[in-house]
Each structure stands twice: as structure tokens, then as C-alpha cells.
Image (cartoon, grey):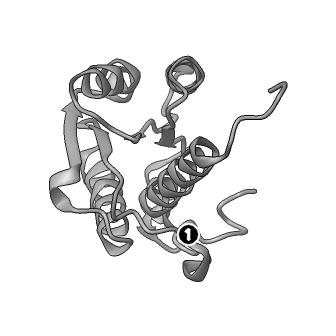
Amino acid sequence: MASSLKNLSEYDDSNMPSAEDMSFGIVVSEWNTKITHALYEAAHDTLVKHGAKTDDIHTLQVPGSFELPVGAKMLASRKKLDAVICLGCVIKGETTHNEYINQSVATGLMTLSVASGKPFVFGLLTPNDEQQAIDRAGGKHGNKGVEAAATAIRMVAIKKGLDEQKQTIGF
């Protein structure tokens, strides 16, 4: 759904699992700092709001969005994390570089997720211009960092729920 039709900061708070016993990584791009740090603050605050301890939130800054997947892999290989949230912003600009970067980040994070069975959450803004980025980093369309953190909490809760189920014949 387009973020112009849904506020990225709105979610059903009453159905949110507790993040009290969860550990998270947040990898944030330094490129477009004004935007990415607003995403980071929102993600961090959302995790804490739902019970994550600040000592269980590990942050790594990488130079740009293209480096998010490798930064996420480095962080996940050094810390015991339940999920890794990756935050960045690639503004379209005058060339098609954004298409290559966005697709590469999406593919890299999906590959990490599937290979590890751990959520590597795509929190990359892919706006056409700076105003669209601002609108999605705390502006009129909410904050993608909130959405990414809520996704991470929910995915970890799903995984923990499945881990607790008794094994049956078959799958």
C-alpha cells in the first residue's frame, strides 16, 4: 500500500507483542543523514516503547544504503540478535542509480533473511525527491522507522511462537 494512503507510524498498539526478551540490531546509512537519523530515532523509540532494553539494541552506521546488507551481516555475526532493522534513504535524483541500489538492498536483505531464518527488515526509503523522504521520516506520512521496528518485533514474536510449537510428523 502506498504510504500516501497509510501513515507509516500507525499500527495496532494493542496487538503488539512485548519486545522485552528480544535483541535487535539497527543498521543505519550515513547518506541522507537528516532523513536516516530520523528513521533511526523512531525505530529505536518504538523498540523501547514495546519493552526492548537499550542494552539489547545494537547500532551500526554504514556509509550508504548499498552497504546495509553487508553491515547487517557483520552486526548479526558478532551479536546475538533476534532481528536486524536496516534503515536508509535513496532519493531518485537525475540518474537511475536508485533502481540498482534499491534492488540490491532488497535482494541482499531477503537473501540474509531466508538463509538465516532471522528477520532482516527493509527500512529503506525509495522516494522520488527529498520532500517525499521528509514526509516518510516523521512528516505527513509518518515514519518508516516506526513501521520497520514494529515489523521486527512482530516477526521475532512469530519466530519465537513457531519455535515453541511441538514438532509434528511432516513439516
Instruction: Classify mark 1: residues with Cα within 10 Å, few (<14), some (14-19) or many (20+).
Output: many
Task: Name the residue rendered at 56%, 57% in the picture.
Answer: 154
Element type where label 1 sits in the image: loop
Residue 11 can be seen, yes or no: no
User: In which quadrant will I find the C terminus?
Assistant: top right
* Residue that numbered label 1 is attached to: 141
Residue 15 is situated, as x and y percent measured from the top left of the image, at 61, 75
Residue 105 can be seen, yes or no: yes
User: In which quadrant will I find the N terminus?
Assistant: bottom right
In the shown orientation, is residue 104 left or right of residue 83?
right
Image quadrant in which you'd find residue 103 = top right
In the shown orientation, is residue 39 left or right of residue 101?
left
Residue 20 is situated, as x and y percent measured from the top left of the image, at 34, 64
Task: Name the residue rendered at 33%, 70% in the picture.
Answer: 51
Residue 18 is situated, as x and y percent measured from the top left of the image, at 44, 68
The residue lying furthest to the right in this view is 170
Q: Nearer the viewer, residue 116 or 13?
A: 116
The residue lying furthest to the left in this view is 55
Tag count in the figure?
1
Rendered view: 147 above or below 127: below
Q: Nearer the viewer, residue 106 or 31?
A: 106
Image quadrant in which you'd find residue 77 = top left
Three-letter residue code for mark 1: His
Residue 38 is situated, as x and y percent measured from the top left of the image, at 30, 60
In the shown orientation, is residue 62 left or right of residue 72?
left
Rendered view: 79 above or below 154: above
Q: Nearer the viewer, residue 73 or 93?
A: 73
Task: Name the residue rendered at 58%, 42% in the picture.
Answer: 163
Task: Name the residue rendered at 84%, 24% in the picture.
Answer: 170
